Image (tube, rainbow, N blue to C red):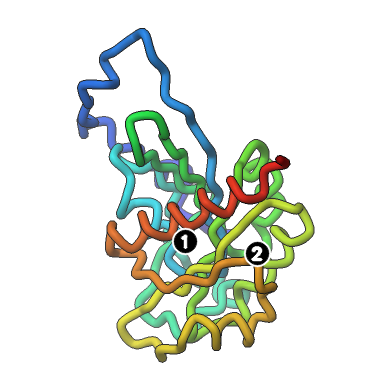
Amino acid sequence: MDFAGSEAIVAGPEAEEAVQDWQKDTSRAPATAKIVVAGGFGVGKTTFVGSVSEITPLTTEALMTRASEETDDLDGLPEKTTTTVAMDFGRITLDQDLVLYLFGTPGQQRFWFMWDDLARGAIGGVVLADTRRLADCFPALDYFETSGLPFVVAVNEFADAPRYAADDVRDALSVPPHVPVVVCDARERATVIETLLVLCGQALAALPE
């Protein structure tokens, strides 16, 4: 595909991450967990990771060109000009003893071969859904259901998207009763954190007794 090269990878080395007091204590080490953020093309995965990351997130955004017009369906996404071609990465400290590493997957089918590597070692996943393109999250749902990883469905409420109750989305996607369905705004840190907390609870509930 005709993308704008590997120079599109941005890690933001100019930004200094905040160091908390507990992080200076070499006698302790927090628990860490890996979480995968998946979903369809343009659903908000990069925004989701970036809105909560306490470090400058690594992104692999590339400009879309005419060469990808027949591959990338922009229906309902008229202003989208870039796409993730590898992954997004961010980190958030939820508590002094818990650090989450977030890995956002690329949404297009030609990049799905990366999902196994990104999901390896994860405690669970977040499947982002856009009510304007609800069917686009089916591949991510199928992936997590097949892999057995705990997951939650998070409806990302875009400004121009129709609003539906979480239960209505559950019915439309045939999400099993034990899988949480929540509503969030990927731009809002507080709602993203709430989604991650729900996933952590889901992952804990799935642990063998």
What is the x, y in percent for residue 79?
A: 35, 77
Question: Of 59 and 38, which appears nearest the observer?
Answer: 38
Residue that numbered label 2 is attached to: 140
Name above or below for residue 155 compared with residue 97: below
**Seen from this angle, which residue lies furthest right?**
146
Residue drawn at x 79%, y 59% as measured from the top left: 146
What is the x, y in percent for residue 148?
A: 75, 53
**Seen from this angle, which residue lies furthest front?**
209
What is the x, y in percent for residue 206?
A: 67, 49
For residue 137, which numbered disc appears in the image? Answer: none
Question: Of 112 and 141, which appears nearest the observer?
Answer: 141
Residue drawn at x 72%, y 41% as measured from the top left: 208
Name above or below for residue 151 compared with residue 182: above
**Seen from this angle, which residue lies furthest top?**
27
Residue drawn at x 55%, y 50% as measured from the top left: 36
Question: Label 1: how many residues lie within 10 Å, few (<14), some (14-19) or many (20+)?
Answer: many
